[in-house]
Amino acid sequence: MLRRRPDANALVLNAVSSRGDGSRNNMAAPLKVDYGFDTEDLESSAKIVKFAIFKKHQEQDAAQEHEVASFEETMLPHMDAAHNLAKWLLRNEEDARDVVQEAYLRAFKSFSGFHGSNGRAWLLTIVRNTSYTLLKKNRAVDLTTTFDEEIHTSGQESVSPATVLEHSENAELIKEAMDELPAEFREILVLRHLEGLSYKEIADIAQLAPGTVMSRLARARAKLKEYLAARIGKDNR
Amino acid sequence: MNCEEAINLMDGYMDGELDPITNQEIERHLRDCRACEQAYAAQRALVRTIAGGAVPYYKAPAELRQRIQSSLRDGIADRPARTAVARDSQVLFRRRWPELRTILLGTPWNWLGLAGLGLAAAIIFAAIIFSNLAPMVRRPAADQFLATQLIASHVRSLMANHLTDVASSDQHTVKPWLDAKLDFAPAVVDLASEGFPLLGGRLDYLDNRTVAALVYQRRKHFINVFTWPAESGTTGTTKTMTRQGYQLLHWVDSDINYWAVSDVSEADLQAFKKVFEDRTARH
């Protein structure tokens, strides 16, 4: 295969000489230069191709390294928030880590499309969606669709304020009760009270209509009080 | 404002998400209504406990941070930009065309005279020949480049403690794992009985695509077998190469490329190829 190049040169020279002797000397030189490398030296042309590929890779690697760096700068500070939400949603450390890692890779893939300023809300949206995908795949029982009726039938007034106040500082009890809540309620309490996000941000992350954030938070808190009361009842028995 | 309205808006009031007028109305109601005031106080105490650190805030462990940072860098190789390289190297040749024209136009016309037409024809002729030859120039370079990549992959797999993604001598574990991650189904056979035990498989990136790497052992040596779909009609092709002391053996079977890379002797590698082919044919 390599041997064929001299033939090509011969053809080129023949073609050039067909123009007539007068112009041959003048024109042959620029014609060679036009290819950007010595056409007679096959080795060097192969080297040039290799070098071009190498150079291209180098440039791409540099560009991508830069992209990774700017992504990390924007997104790594929110890893605690991402992990916290995933852990509360999945209630399992291994799953939480997997979800956070996958969410970061997904975020990186669509990072060029992210022009917002709220990196934390954007990342938490991805973490939430990834977590729910996993919860649904595992057919987690806590994705209840019936909690709406439950909460409405077992009215919140059944828990007296005095009881709630009495146990409002029992951290262990509250943690256990919160862990038992349906995922939608755990999520909104975490976003509001552990991340301190606004209703607007919560609406974006949990994909809720802005007007329904307050009512869902109200239902989550009511349910939490109900679970607390149930636990207090158990403890006293 | 009555109690029911106040209870409904209490959460928004507590979170400071209501408009000032509604805020004032609730404040007034809470001053006047002891029941609602108690309910509000209880709820606020509860929420303060939650927000005040009573429930755990699960910080990300350092291990996860490292895992994500390294997976972001691994992810670079899978991104589409890489595949553009092969196309760009062709552009290197084509890009010369406009410059040819500039030189033609920049040359005084009295030089060209009647020969001008002949020159144009000659240049076009030369260019056609050249563009036909360009792929041939590229070919050996591409093969060399692939060989370099293969050896680099092989060496890296031994060096970086990343020999296998899925470590198992059971072909029924390795194959499904690879199938799930690739757009083709590589043949996986355990050749322990022939003296080439299967150690596992992993994903790798070669020749601008994701490929499967199967890892076999020969005494103290490792054999990496890289496989990916070949162009149709290349079945039967074989190639051997020796570079930097490594043996490379290439064959195409059922439109799948195989590149075995190892530091075992050529005879051993040929023997490996034979048993591998025998076993895959039986499967």
Image (spheres, rainbow, N blue to C red):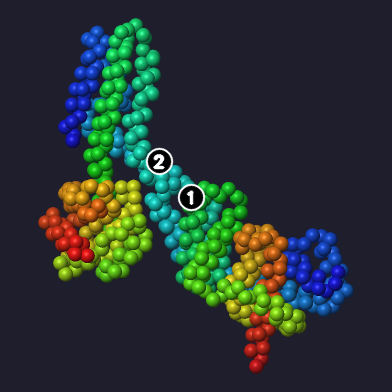
Left or right side of B89 for B269: left
Looking at the image, the residue that sits furthest to the bottom is: A237
**Relative to residue A108, is residue A156 depicted above or below?**
below
Left or right side of B251 for B97: right
The residue drawn where x is 63% and y is 71% is A185
Q: Position of residue B147 (x, y in %)?
A: 24, 47
**Residue where numbered disc 1 is placed:** A69
Q: Which mark is residue A59?
A: 2
**Relative to residue A42, is residue A86 depicted above or below?**
below
Left or right side of A131 for A21: left
Question: Disc 2 on helix, strand or loop?
Answer: helix
Distance of label 2 from label 1 (alpha carbons): 15 Å
Nearest the viewer among B162 and A18 is: A18
Q: Position of residue A212 (x, y in %)?
A: 69, 64
Nearest the viewer among B261 and A8 is: A8
Instruction: Bin the neighbour count of mark 1 within 10 Å (Cα to Cα): few under 14, some 14-19, many 20 and up.
Output: some
Q: Amino acid at mark 2?
A: Glu
Nearest the viewer among B155 and B33 is: B33
- Residue A61 can be seen in this image: no
Protein chain holding label 2:
A
The residue drawn where x is 26% and y is 41% is B142
